[in-house]
Amino acid sequence: MFTINDNFCKLPESYLFSEVARRINAFKQTNPEADVIRMGIGDVTLPLCKAAIEAMHKAVDDEGNAETFHGYGPEQGYAFLRDAIAKYDYNKRNIDIDPSEIFVSDGAKSDTGNFGDILSVNNIVAVTDPVYPVYVDTNVMAGRAGELTDGAWNKIVYLPVTAANDFIPALPTDDIVPDIIYLCYPNNPTGTTLTRNQLKVWVDYALKHGSLILFDSAYETFIRQEDVPHSIYEIEGARRCAVEFRSFSKTAGFTGVRCGYTVVPKDLVTCDSEGKEVSLNSLWNRRQCTKFNGASYISQRGAAAVYTDEGRKQIKEAVDYYLTNARILREGLTAAGLEVFGGINAPYVWIKTPGNMTSWEFFDLLLKKCNVAGTPGSGFGPSGEGYFRLTAFNTLENTIEAVKRITTRL
């Protein structure tokens, strides 16, 4: 009889957001008249920007003509998109990234989960806590996480980020040095950020210890404060210790279209088990060529249009719209007496649950009394207990209504 990867069986039975959806649906079945405002899963509500739509319409027409038809494209992504990414996301910020270091994909979630394919299962993994579940779950699948005990995996190093330390993760203790460090800034789920000096601490640590930083920068477009870096490569030395993941999902509304990219600098090298120097850029290229046929021509044309003058203007308007929602949530809930964090450089607000309520107790209270659904912080890791996430991706009208319900019904 064939066997399976037992690590998959170690995962909790339900993915966090699936459980959130199940509970909302159960509530709706028993309360069909309830108008539930969903502010849990970070899906966008605004339509794609006009520039991207027009580009994709033209790309569809290209596929209908023999002279302009595109079949299999480059696994790394088309040059027209990689060149635009290098120019606008990096070079214009005085960051030295070459198009050959950029790999276009179907999203940052896929890449953050798949990058472990080229890394040893013996690596020690560190995550900030609370954390985006994909980082942890994919390492469980790979066999790096160990066993789940009291809500934490015993082989993963958890770096708490809470109000107690101003949401700034402390470096690991001297008795254990992680090989792989996941950082997400602006942070999901807390909506908090690191300054350049705070991020430099991590780059310096990685360079000193030979660690690899996997830096999820999916929300960089939401940054509005000057001292918050848009890319880890703004920090000297990061090209030698960091991989960066980005997405068009929250930036340009591509949650359904699917397009993102990963930057793997050619300066990033390590050694194999025999001591031979190996380039991570080459390894990731080999992995993608073997297991991925590239994002679609149509989605890449849409993504490239985001970098036109009109496209950049349109996505800024969309991001500003969501940041307005975040401000309304932050200010309204603070005025209501709740302790609220984030929501300044990110589309998430992170709420301290009142009293001694657990995250799921607050979820049930908010759903039943206010008909507002969010995400319990405990689903993001042990240090998320006692916190709750709301997203700013709903409509302005629903955001205002949600704040009104919470302030008047709780």
Image: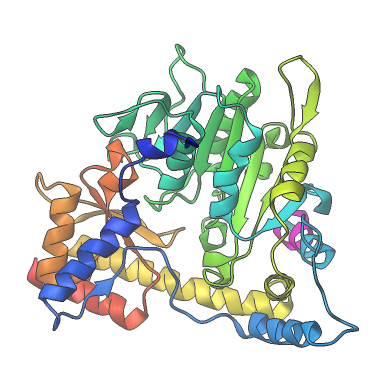
Q: Nearer the viewer, residue 69 or 124?
A: 69
- Please tell me whether residue 157 is drawn above or below residue 139 in the rendered image: above
Q: Give me the residue at 13% from left, 53% from top.
A: 361
In this view, 387 is above or below 79:
above
> 154 above or below 375?
above
| Foreground of the two, 353 or 124 | 124
Residue 51, x across and y down, in percent = 67, 83
Question: Is 334 in front, or is 57?
Answer: 57
For residue 142: magenta?
Answer: no
Q: Position of residue 315 (x, y in %)?
A: 58, 75
Q: Please report the bounds of the magenta region as a residue range.
A: 85-91
* Left or right, residue 227 beside residue 390: right
Point 57% across, 52% down: residue: 110
Left or right relative to 4: residue 370: left
Return the x and y of residue 90 as percentages of the image width and height: 73, 54
Magenta: main secondary structure equals helix
Can residue 230 be seen here? The reply is no
Q: Residue furthest toward the right?
A: 67
Asked which quadrant contains residue 407, the reply is bottom left
The image quadrant that residue 8 belongs to is: top left
Q: Residue furthest top?
A: 175
Image location (x, y in percent) of residue 198: 51, 36
| 218 shown above or below 136 | below
Residue 378 visible in rendering: yes
Residue 297 in the figure: left or right of residue 334 = right
The quadrant the C terminus occupies is bottom left
Seen at 19% across and 49% down, the residue is 359
What colour-coding does the image apply?
rainbow
Q: How many marks?
A: 0
